[in-house]
């Protein structure tokens, strides 16, 4: 498969947006978690599950 330069840039931009949203939302969830229930870090479940998706997205974008 040969992608145009524009398509490759679009894929990388989409990945970077996904990564930025992941970081911002998980920081927000971590703050909420630590303020409300500091004894149980439930936000790690969200970060871990979503993190798997971000890694897969990155692999797909970089492999293409």
Image: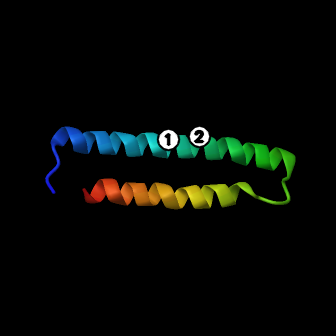
- Label 1 neighbour load within 10 Å: few <14, some 14-19, many 20+: few
Q: Is residue 29 above or below residue 57?
A: above
Specify the quadrant that holds the C terminus.
bottom left
**Quick one: SS at disc 2?**
helix
The Cα atoms of the two marked residues, 2 and 1, are separated by 6 Å
- Label 2 neighbour load within 10 Å: few <14, some 14-19, many 20+: few
Q: Give residue 20's mark.
A: 1
Report x, y in % for residue 49: 59, 60
In the image, what residue occupies the spot 77% across and 43% down?
A: 32
Contact (Cβ within 8 Å) of mark 2 with mark 1: yes
Of 55 and 39, the residue lying toward us: 55
In the image, what residue occupies the spot 38% across and 41% down?
A: 14
What's the colour scheme?
rainbow
Report x, y in % for residue 47: 62, 55
Q: Would residue 52 appear left or right of 28 to someone viewing this image?
A: left
- Residue of label 2: 24
**Quick one: SS at disc 1?**
helix
Report x, y in % for residue 52: 51, 61
In the image, what residue occupies the spot 16% across and 57% down?
A: 1
In the image, what residue occupies the spot 35% across and 39% down?
A: 13
């Amino acid at each position: 498969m040969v992608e145009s330069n524009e398509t490759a840039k679009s894929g990388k931009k989409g990945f970077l947006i996904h990564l930025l949203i992941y970081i911002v939302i998980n920081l927000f969830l971590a703050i909420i978690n630590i303020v409300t229930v500091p004894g149980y870090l439930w936000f790690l479940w969200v970060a871990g599950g979503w993190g798997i998706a971000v890694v897969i997205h990155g692999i797909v974008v970089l492999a293409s």
